[in-house]
């Protein structure tokens, strides 16, 4: 079981790395927003995998808070409206 969790953690860490590359590469704001959403979701998954692997039950609580923050962040970014960042609708 530990081997399976370790492989899952490495795979999710690789997905986080790919999201980070896309975040810096862009080219549009929408691409960067999707990269942030990918990293938030992958971070939640990674925490849920690392919790049993490292015997840290608090990781589930942290994953829940991260999922809520990611949802609020995406809602705030999409409520901004069209145009350049910071201009509003």
Image (spheres, grey):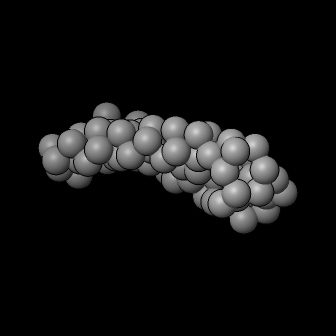
Which residue appears at 38% of the width and 39% of the height?
67
Quadrant of the frame with the C terminus: top right
Which residue appears at 75% of the width and 43% of the height?
82
The residue sitting at the right extreme is 27
Horizontal relation, residue 79 to residue 61: left or right:
right
Horizontal relation, residue 65 to residue 22: left or right:
left
Which sits in the foreground, 70 or 38? 70
The image position of residue 28, as x and y in percent, is 81, 53
Which sits in the foreground, 50 or 80? 80
83 vs 72: above or below: below
The image position of residue 34, as x and y in percent, is 66, 43
Quadrant of the frame with the N terminus: top left
Horizontal relation, residue 45 to residue 87: left or right:
left
The image position of residue 7, as x and y in percent, is 47, 44
Which residue appears at 24% of the width and 40% of the height?
60
Q: Total marks drawn?
A: 0
Which sits in the foreground, 46 or 25? 25
The residue sitting at the bottom extreme is 24
Which residue appears at 62% of the width and 46% of the height?
80
Asked if residue 47 can be seen in this view, the reply is yes
Asked if residue 31 can be seen in this view, the reply is no
Horizontal relation, residue 48 to residue 37: left or right:
left
The image position of residue 52, as x and y in percent, is 23, 41
């Amino acid at each position: 079981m530990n081997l399976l969790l370790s492989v899952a953690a490495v795979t999710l860490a690789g997905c986080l790395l790919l999201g980070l590359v896309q975040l810096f590469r862009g080219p549009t704001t929408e691409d960067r927003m999707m990269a942030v959403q990918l990293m938030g979701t992958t971070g939640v998954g990674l925490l849920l995998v690392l919790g049993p692997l490292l015997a840290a039950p608090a990781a589930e609580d942290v994953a829940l808070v991260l999922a809520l923050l990611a949802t609020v962040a995406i809602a705030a970014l999409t409520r901004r409206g069209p145009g350049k960042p910071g201009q509003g609708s």
